[in-house]
Image (cartoon, rainbow, N blue to C red):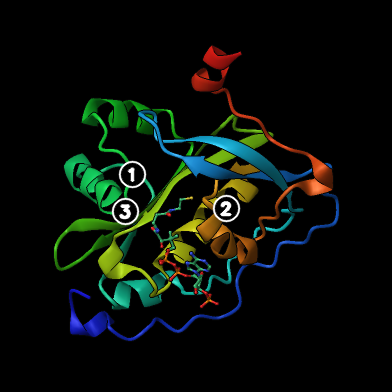
Amino acid sequence: MHNSRITSPIPLSPPLRLKPNHPHKNFAVSAQLVRNNLGIQASLRVVSAQLQTTKTDYSISDADLESRGFHLRRTPDGLNLTHLNSVFVSVGFPKRDPDKIRTALDHTDSLVWVEYEKTKRPVAFARATGDGVFNAIIWDVVVDPSFQGIGLGKAVMERVVNELLGKGITNIALYSEPRVLGFYRPLGFVADPDGITGMVYSRERKKKK
Ligand SMILES: CC(C)(COP(=O)(O)OP(=O)(O)OC[C@H]1O[C@@H](n2cnc3c(N)ncnc32)[C@H](O)[C@@H]1OP(=O)(O)O)[C@@H](O)C(=O)NCCC(=O)NCCS
């Protein structure tokens, strides 16, 4: 951990309460994730969650985050893409062309990142793309390894999901590595709703056929 002020886990209260009542209408996608140049390809498992509320009783409030030196940001303004790339690389994501990251952010509907006051660097990040009405997919959920385990991942996920719900978007999908499924489940994401399985285009597989 970088700083003694944040060595203690941030107190966490119950996560968003998202009710899986109508999984056929509202689903999220989980996937075994294999990284390629684009970031990921996946053999998918579709998951279901009824995301029907826009609760704002976050596990950690904006004020609590601020008091610990973590500033929530909801636009790309002030986001240093080189630093963001460093966080991606530090967790094993591929390093990306900053111009392409900028383009991706320009096409991003919901974005939440956390700036650490002491270093002015991004330490947590999540974003969602979509059609703005029905569907969204969450991408690039990442927390700097030095800041993992203190609630920042949950904090950014809760806020991205809540923003999407606030727009009336209830089909919210994401790709998950198997080892991270347990992180997403309490946030309302469920694998393979009604047996629905997502699929991702694979150039490798297509070549073999
Ligand atoms: C996955 C990741 C975003 C989690 O962020 P984090 O800030 O470390 O997680 P938090 O501290 O917010 O944890 C929130 C809760 O999820 C749990 N959790 C965190 N990671 C978990 C995991 N891999 N599996 C199961 N539960 C997990 C925590 O124990 C905590 O539980 P609690 O609310 O009961 O206390 C972060 O570890 C990360 O960036 N990993 C590398 C990149 C990655 O794998 N991203 C996801 C791509 S699919």
Observer-side mark, 2 or 1, equals 1
Label 3, on which residue? 91
Q: Give, as a three-letter code, the residue at label 2.
A: Val
Q: Where is residue 63 in the image (x, y as percent from the top left)?
A: 39, 74
Label 1, on which residue? 93
Q: How crowded is mark 3: few (under 14 residues within 10 Å), some or many (20 or more)?
A: few
Q: Give, as a three-letter code, the residue at label 3.
A: Val
Left or right, 157 with respect to 106, comes to: right
Precedes in sequence: disc 2 or disc 3: 3
Q: Does the residue labelled 1 lie within 8 Å of ligand 1?
A: yes
Is the C-beta separation of discs 2 and 1 under 8 Å? Answer: no
Left or right, 122 with respect to 142, comes to: left
Q: Where is residue 84 in the image (x, y as percent from the top left)?
A: 25, 46
Measured in 3D between alpha carbons, the distance from the residue under mark 2 to the one under mark 1, in whole angstroms, is 22 Å
Q: Nearer the viewer, residue 176 or 170?
A: 176
Left or right, 87 with respect to 23, comes to: left
Please, what secondary structure does the residue beneath circle 3 have?
loop
Q: Locate the C terminus by quadrant.
A: top right
For image coordinates 47% across by 74% down, the residue present is 60
Q: Does the residue labelled 3 lie within 8 Å of ligand 1?
A: yes
Please, what secondary structure does the residue beneath circle 2 have?
helix
Precedes in sequence: disc 2 or disc 1: 1
Residue 111 appears in view: yes
Is the C-beta separation of discs 2 and 3 under 8 Å? Answer: no
Measured in 3D between alpha carbons, the distance from the residue under mark 1 to the one under mark 3, in whole angstroms, is 6 Å
Observer-side mark, 2 or 3, equals 3
Q: Residues within 10 Å of mark 1 (few under 14, many from 20)?
A: some
Label 2, on which residue? 161
Residue 183 versus residue 150 in the image, above or below: above
Residue 92 versus residue 108 in the image, above or below: below
Q: Nearer the viewer, residue 185 or 122?
A: 185
For image coordinates 39% across by 49% down, the residue present is 74
